[in-house]
Image (tube, rainbow, N blue to C red):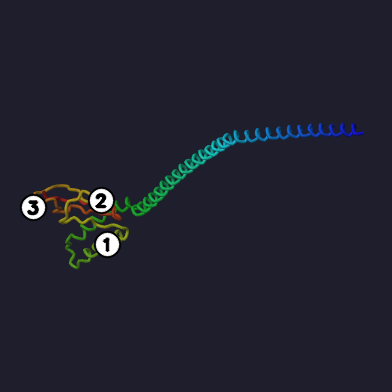
Amino acid sequence: MKKKEKNKTEGEKVNKKEQDARTNQQKTGQNKEEKQTSSQKENGEPANQAADADIIADYQRQIEAKEASLNEANDKFLRLFSEFDNYRKRVARERIELTKTAAEGVIASLLPVLDDLERASQIETEVKDGSLQEGIKLIYNKFKAILRQKGIEEIDTQGKEFDTDFHEAITHIPASDEKQKGKVVEEVQKGYLLNGKVIRYAKVVVAN
């Protein structure tokens, strides 16, 4: 009986040793796995960080390229808008100028008639009551007033400095004194402006 109990006790001890050995092996395996996992994590983190940095740098380059493209498109738009605005203003200005001088050809063709009326109004007639002379002057003044309403104005010449923008010198004469040099001394034919634009230069005699 005692022998059986002794064998049983020894068997239990053996079994316990085997269990302890298996437990130690399991713990050793877990420790190895944990070390391997930790080592993999440690080795993998720098690689992941490098990959993330590359992705961020790539996105940054794409953003910069988009911003450059947007800035270029914005500059083009501003230039086109400025050019169109200048074109619109130029067309409006040209339209106004055209409106002012639209009748230039017709009015210029009437100027010789105005000259004739002016000369006729200055001729002394032999009519005793002067009715013919007064009638001519009336027509001349009325015609002149109508043209003035249309923007016609005479170019002032007498005693003025000779100006090629308004005067046409048909001849030159010696000046009687220094003050007269370069000035208009006689008007041969009147000059006219239409809304500030010369439609006929004044023909003048200039002192030199």
Task: Pick out the residue farthest to the right.
Answer: 1
Q: Which mark is residue 178?
A: 3
Residue drawn at 22 percent across, 64 percent down: 132
Between the residue at mark 1 and the residue at mark 3, the CA separation in whole angstroms equals: 42 Å
Amino acid at the residue labelled 3: Glu
Q: Earlier in the sequence, mark 2 or mark 1?
A: 1
Quarter of the image for residue 122 reads bottom left
Q: Nearer the viewer, mark 2 or mark 3?
A: 3
Residue drawn at 14 percent across, 47 percent down: 171
Q: Nearer the viewer, residue 71 or 161?
A: 71
Task: Pick out the residue farthest to the left.
Answer: 176
Amino acid at the residue labelled 1: Ile
Between the residue at mark 2 and the residue at mark 1, the CA separation in whole angstroms equals: 22 Å
Q: Position of residue 149 (x, y in %)?
A: 31, 61
Q: Position of residue 27 (x, y in %)?
A: 72, 35
Label 1, secondary structure: give it.
helix
